[in-house]
Image (cartoon, helix red, strand yellow):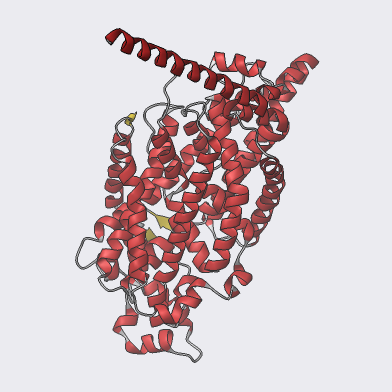
Amino acid sequence: MDETYLSRKTYILLLIYLSTSVGNLVNQANTAVTNGTIGYLVWYFLASVFVGIPLAYMELSLGQFTRRNVIDIWKIRPCLSHIGYIVVIWQIIILVYNHTVVTYLMQYFLVSFQKPIPYHTCGQWSYQNCNIIEKNYTVYWVCVRGKQKRMDFCNNIYTTYPEYQYYRSNAMQTQENAISLNWRIYLTSGLVLVVVYFHNFKKLNSAKWFLIPFALYPYMGYFYLFVGSMQQKGLIQKYEDALDTGLQKFRRSGRITQIIHQMIYGLGLGNGVMINISSKAAFRTPCYVNAVLSVLISLFFTIVAVFTTALMSCPIEYKSINPILSLPMSFTFEKVPMMLYEYDSNEYFLITNYSAQTMLGITTDIVIFFSLLEILTKKVPFARHVVATGYYRIMNIVSTFIVITQCFCFILWYGFERFSEDVHFMQGIKPNNYLKLSWASAIFVLVYVIFSELYFVMKNPRGVGDKIGFFTLVTFVVLVVSLTGIKLLVAALKSKQAFWKAIEIDPSWGPKNKLLRRSRALFSAQAMTKEYIYRQYQLQAGIQERQKRANLRVNYGDELSTN
């Protein structure tokens, strides 16, 4: 029986790694600045406190109480045992997607050291009319500074930006709707894999010296970006528009359901990684404190990232009448380089930005890779893959679907009182009515959120990314529902007794430790009342008092013998 535990410091750092991912920098920041910064942050704060903390507490309690990974924990009922394997597949998909983003981030980080920076200039990879705004004064005046009705050519002027053409023609090598990858991307991908592998070479023993620096550097980097953004031109004139202090943009295009989806995905809920990490924690580790700590740190970092990104847009918005944030361009690889290009000493800010994002992406890879190592093998195959912006929208929905399934199986079906007693037995404190109400209401809220967001995505498709993502979501839902139905049907055909056995709780489910499982079976809620705990403290105090008296008698006897 494996009785190894993560230290409290390592455990909390892994939770911070998971809940402070590159998605907090890229996707949340992009959505917030595009749809209204202040309104987004207010609702993100409310969603994190009233939905994120209870759900994180639930997942941490499940993993810590049972000490089982995400495969074993779904064996609570025989008809649900297949869901754990589906969640593992989802972890691999997230790892592949995250690895793709990190690969491009590291590529941009490395080329930011070149002079001139390649994505700010036209090169051999550029095509017709590259950077025509800087070369042709008439185009600049008509398309950028002109207030009169502009020509149709100006509607697609963003395709002439060097940042746009570098990403599409050099990094992605897009030609006639076919996408291939630059050879540098393959080398960078291999470098990322080497870093992640050596961090997990001896599991966390080989990464313990890097945990704190990897956790602190992104905060320091974005603090530097925040301070630098406060000193740039155009801040005073454009900060109200960037922050959307009047909430005009948020009223027009903000969606609360999208914010909840992004919060769930950003915290790492629903992908099983949090359950795997908590299964390696000590049994009495305070779950609620850890859940609150990880969510609040993630919330703080998201607020800093969103505010920094909003301020980054001020210089270029001040220079140009065209709103860059509304353009159909990649936020991280096309809009951010354009925004930072207007900064003084922009090369330092570019290096800081991409190094911080790369560091966050690598830490997320490390955590997911560590989670898979606890389940599968010591090697994860590398697949050739492509970034799909629209796919991220469906990834949020898949994570939300898994969270709903967890709430239904481990809260409603398992039973509120039974789950509360499990937490009571483990922590010595029974969950209060607020947490019970949060768990119950979260199911209905998330069901509404997922259908509302699906309706919006289907009504406003963005292309191939959404189609692939929608296919992925349907595949996961069909697998979960159909396999459960097939198991129940097979059991029902065998006998009535087999059917009821398939939906009953597995008697062996619970703490993996046999002694703890036996103790839980004998546990009753009355055994941990305040009166019982008070008596235990009194008994311990009496023992300590008798020991003190014995020590005094011994010391007094020694003094008499000396005299």
How far across and down, in percent of the image, does residue 287 sit? 54, 35
Pick the front one: 19 or 422: 422
The residue positioned 51% from the left and 26% from the top of the image is 283
Task: Using the rendered image of the protein, determine whether residue 398 is visible from the camera's viewpoint.
Answer: no
Using the image, determine if residue 215 lies above or below residue 113. above
Nearer-the-camera pick, 482 or 129: 482
Residue at the left extreme?
115
Q: Is residue 355 above or below residue 371?
A: below
Q: In this view, does 74 lie to the left or right of 496?
A: left
The residue lying toward the viewer, choosing from 293 and 235, is: 293
Q: Quick check: 264 left or right of 522?
A: left
As drawn, which residue projects farthest toward the top?
A: 561
Q: In which quarter of the image is the C terminus?
A: top left
Q: Determine whether, in the image, residue 260 is placed left or right of residue 325.
A: right
Give the image location of residue 146, x and y in percent: 44, 89
Q: Quadrant of residue 376?
A: top left
> Which percent across, then down, holds residue 442?
68, 46
Q: Residue at x 71, y 43 (%)?
A: 437
Whether residue 313 sits left or right of residue 267 in the image: it is left
Q: Is residue 142 visible?
A: yes
User: Residue sitting at 50 percent across and 53 percent down?
Assistant: 299
The outermost residue toward the front is 563
The picture quadrant where one finds residue 80 is: top right
